[in-house]
């Protein structure tokens, strides 16, 4: 190598051949090119000159004024940018809460539709004979709604897609089993009942637990999004205080050093920042309050109503299964008690409207009557009460209708309230940004006026 | 169409049943005894219990009390006071005890038997409260008193005599296997490594345990076996020929194969504490055999055309 590129005794201050260490040169010269060595004092001189310039620039009264002015301008710009981000961040947090709440409503709707379809199928089976056209329509509509809601939910939150795909598979299998049950029933084959049982089982074992996990995840997401909104007003307050100090200190300095009491541009900058900042703070506080109200009100009510409906439908199919089991249905009756207690607890905490709570209580009273008849040996009377125009079935239908209307109203309110909470935040964010820029411009102008007096 | 199919299948079943009963106490019986020995050696969960002739029951009540006048202090009097007979039955065994999907009512051979018992107590066959019990629930339901009588294709055997009492034998069934129509299998011994379904708590399930190479798939109700069979999850179903005949009647792609692996004499189950009720039920069964009702029931459920075979001969002599 050394023979290929014979180096001169001392490398020229130009560009040394890279990667070819000159013999006798100290090791540092391999990493640092040789010409760097003579420039070191030059660079040091340059740095000290720059430092002198800066020190000169910011020393003495005009220097202090320049420094304070620069801080004020930077503070105003930072105020604009940071508070803009805080406001848009809050807006997107509320938007997230709304999106997750909507997703929660969708997932609950899928759950409700599935337990409802199951309750209808078991009840139709209990009656025997051809199922009424209305019942068949209700089932078909229920399954179509389920399929559509699953597609919507998977599109809305791709994170949930895997779980929803699993649910979709179960629904496909479920409908196949129900059709088998129907075909067998229609031919008078009792094996239809076994298909129905299996259909009911896969919904309960495979689909519902997956959906319950999704509900828990969505509830957590709603809570997280709501909690994330807490930081925005704090950020705004901190920025407001810092910017106010950054604008106020130069005014005090100028008051002390010049004969003028007020610097109008700086006063205007302070005014803009304080007024816009307080307006923004008020808006954010209002948005937060609106969000909290929506969470404590329509959101909790939506969750409670959906839970109550799922529990009630589950209870209704447990009631039918208890009757189908004819005396060996103790396990189903236990399930009835468990899920109906869930439903009652959901409506009990004051989250459900009075009509829904009363309708549920009425159905549960009728159910006790069904059980009393069946346990007393009056099986046919119990079935009559629990199906068709029987009082227990009518009571359940009333609950279904009332709770459905209440749920629709609450989920609409939830979406509306959260939408309203987020609406003013975007204009406020732009206002904050504009205020920051305007205040920075005024601060520059105010300081420039005073500095001119020193030329 | 369906009725004809049932009749053809059940006809075949009856021929086999007749064959089995014709060969009673001869070679085929010793063959079954061998099987029983195999069971006891390979299945430690089912120890052999000697109770003499398992189908021997208590002597029938003679004379029978007229309906509505049950002797004081007897269990029948208690049932009469209650106003209804509580019977544990099946709801998914076509032909014996099943829920007719069209009417929603329970029907079948076993159901008719229960109605005859109610008729004898009350003079009204409708005074019955049905409780649907799975195979595994049959004995516990009798022991805890939640049913008065079990009429659910229940095999009489010595293990069960330890816990409950049986009426005299009212049907003679045998254990067979159900496979797809295109299957070359003719016997359980050809099902090694295959999945075979049986209801838990049934003699079919116990019987299957001796075939250690067979993969047993237990289910709660026998009709669940049929669902698994139709879905291709199991390769075969084992059960009494009577029950399997009900499956074949619902599925043209299923057939019953093989010689009867065991003899399954059916009896009505009654709690051990009520021997007088067993005697009463035996009296009812005696009348059914004598007056041709048994033959009518048989024809109605198991053989819509042609004559019914003679009912199984009742054996008595068990000490109460």
Image (spheres, rainbow, N blue to C red):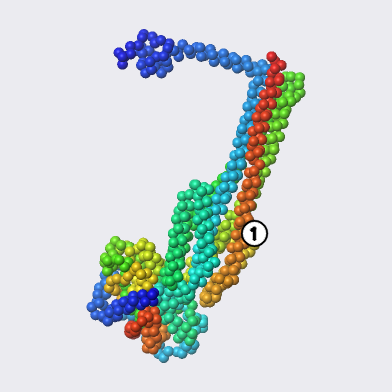
Quarter of the rendering containing residue B140: bottom left
- Residue A390: give x, y in percent of width and height: 57, 72
Residue at mark 1: chain: A
- Residue A330: give x, y in percent of width and height: 49, 68
Could you tell me which quadrant the N terminus of chain B lies in?
bottom left
Look at 49% across and 69% down and name the residue there. Answer: A125
In the picture, measured across the screen, residue A123 lies left or right of residue A252, that is left
Residue at far bottom of view: B63
- Examine the rendered structure and indicate whether residue A254 appears above or below residue A22: below
- Residue A204: give x, y in percent of width and height: 47, 60
In the depicted view, which residue is nearer to us: B100 or B125?
B100
- Examine the rendered structure and indicate whether residue A52 appears above or below residue B166: above
In the depicted view, which residue is nearer to us: A11 or B166?
A11
Badge 1 crowding class, 10 Å Cα cut-off, few under 14, some 14 to 19, many 20 or more, is: some
In the rendered picture of this protein, how many numbered marks are placed on residues? 1
Look at 61% across and 41% down and name the residue there. Answer: A90
Residue at far front of view: B1
Q: Visible in this render: residue A270?
A: yes
In the picture, measured across the screen, residue A373 lies left or right of residue A260, that is left
In the depicted view, which residue is nearer to us: A89 or A331?
A89
For numbered disc 1, what is the local secondary structure?
A: loop
- Residue A425: give x, y in percent of width and height: 64, 40
Q: Which residue is mark 1?
A: A353
């Amino acid at each position: 190598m050394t023979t290929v590129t014979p180096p001169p005794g001392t490398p020229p201050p130009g560009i040394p051949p890279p990667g070819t260490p000159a013999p006798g040169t100290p090791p540092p010269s391999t990493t640092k090119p040789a010409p760097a060595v003579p420039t070191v004092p030059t660079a040091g001189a340059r740095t000290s000159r720059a430092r002198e310039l800066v020190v000169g620039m910011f020393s003495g009264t005009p220097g202090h004024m320049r420094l304070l002015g620069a801080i004020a301008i930077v503070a105003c710009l930072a105020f604009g940018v940071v508070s803009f981000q805080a406001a848009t961040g809050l807006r997107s947090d509320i938007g997230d809460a709304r999106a997750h709440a909507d997703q929660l409503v969708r997932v609950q709707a899928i759950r409700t539709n599935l337990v409802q379809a199951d309750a209808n199928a078991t009840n139709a089976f209990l009656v025997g004979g051809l199922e009424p056209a209305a019942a068949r329509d209700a089932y078909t509509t229920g399954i179509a709604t389920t399929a559509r809601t699953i597609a919507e939910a998977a599109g809305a939150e791709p994170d949930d897609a895997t779980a929803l795909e699993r649910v979709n598979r179960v629904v496909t299998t479920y409908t196949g089993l129900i059709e088998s049950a129907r075909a067998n029933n229609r031919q008078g084959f009792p094996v239809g009942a076994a298909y129905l049982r299996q259909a009911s089982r896969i919904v309960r074992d495979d689909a519902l637990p997956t959906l319950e996990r999704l509900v828990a995840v969505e509830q957590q997401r709603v809570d997280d999004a709501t909690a994330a909104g807490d930081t925005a007003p704090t950020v705004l307050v901190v920025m407001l205080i810092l910017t106010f100090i950054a604008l106020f200190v130069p005014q005090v300095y100028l008051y002390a050093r010049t004969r003028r009491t007020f610097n109008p541009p700086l006063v205007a900058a302070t005014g803009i920042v304080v007024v816009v900042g307080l307006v923004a703070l008020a808006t954010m506080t209002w948005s937060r309050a609106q969000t909290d109200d929506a969470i404590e009100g329509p959101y909790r009510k939506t969750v409670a109503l959906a839970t109550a409906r799922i529990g009630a439908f589950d209870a209704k199919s447990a009631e039918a299964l208890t009757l189908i089991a004819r005396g060996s249905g103790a396990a189903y009756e236990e399930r009835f008690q468990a899920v109906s207690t869930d439903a009652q607890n959901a409506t009990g905490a004051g989250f459900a409207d009075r009509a829904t709570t009363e309708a549920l209580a009425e159905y549960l009273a009728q159910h006790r009557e069904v059980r009393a008849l069946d346990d007393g040996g009056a099986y046919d009377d119990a079935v009559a009460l629990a199906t068709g125009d029987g009082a227990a079935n009518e009571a359940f239908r009333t609950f279904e209708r009332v709770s459905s209307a209440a749920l629709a109203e609450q989920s609409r309110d939830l979406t509306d309230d959260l939408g309203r909470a987020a609406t003013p935040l975007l204009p406020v964010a732009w206002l904050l940004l504009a205020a920051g820029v305007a205040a920075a411009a005024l601060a520059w102008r105010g300081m420039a006026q005073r500095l001119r007096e020193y030329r | 169409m369906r009725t004809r199919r049932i009749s053809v299948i059940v006809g075949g079943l009856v021929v086999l049943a007749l064959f089995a009963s014709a060969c009673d106490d001869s070679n085929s019986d010793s063959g079954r005894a061998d099987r029983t020995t195999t069971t006891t050696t390979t299945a430690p969960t089912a120890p052999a219990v000697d109770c003499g002739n398992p189908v021997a029951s208590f002597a029938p009540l003679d004379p029978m009390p007229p309906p509505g006048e049950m002797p004081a202090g007897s269990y029948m009097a208690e049932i009469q006071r209650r106003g209804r007979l509580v019977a544990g039955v099946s709801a998914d065994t076509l032909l014996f005890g099943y829920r007719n999907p069209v009417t929603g009512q329970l029907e079948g051979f076993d159901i008719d038997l229960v109605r005859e018992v109610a008729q004898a107590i009350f003079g009204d066959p409708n005074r019955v409260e049905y409780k649907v019990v799975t195979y595994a629930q049959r004995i516990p339901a009798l022991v805890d008193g939640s049913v008065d009588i079990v009429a659910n294709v229940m095999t009489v055997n010595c293990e069960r005599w330890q816990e409950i009492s049986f009426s005299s034998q009212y049907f003679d069934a045998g254990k067979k296997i159900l496979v797809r129509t295109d299957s070359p299998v003719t016997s359980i011994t050809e099902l090694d490594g295959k999945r075979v379904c049986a209801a838990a708590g049934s003699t079919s399930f116990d019987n299957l345990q001796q075939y250690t190479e067979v993969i047993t798939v237990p289910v709660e109700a026998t009709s669940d076996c049929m669902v698994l069979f139709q879905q291709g999850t199991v390769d075969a179903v084992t059960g009494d020929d009577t029950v399997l005949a009900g499956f074949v009647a619902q599925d043209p792609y299923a057939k019953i194969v093989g010689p009867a692996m065991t003899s399954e004499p059916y009896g009505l189950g009654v709690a051990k504490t009520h021997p007088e009720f067993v005697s009463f039920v035996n009296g009812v069964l005696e009348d059914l055999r004598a007056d041709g009702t048994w033959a009518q029931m048989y024809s109605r459920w198991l053989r819509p055309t042609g004559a019914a075979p003679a009912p199984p001969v009742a054996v008595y002599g068990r000490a109460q």
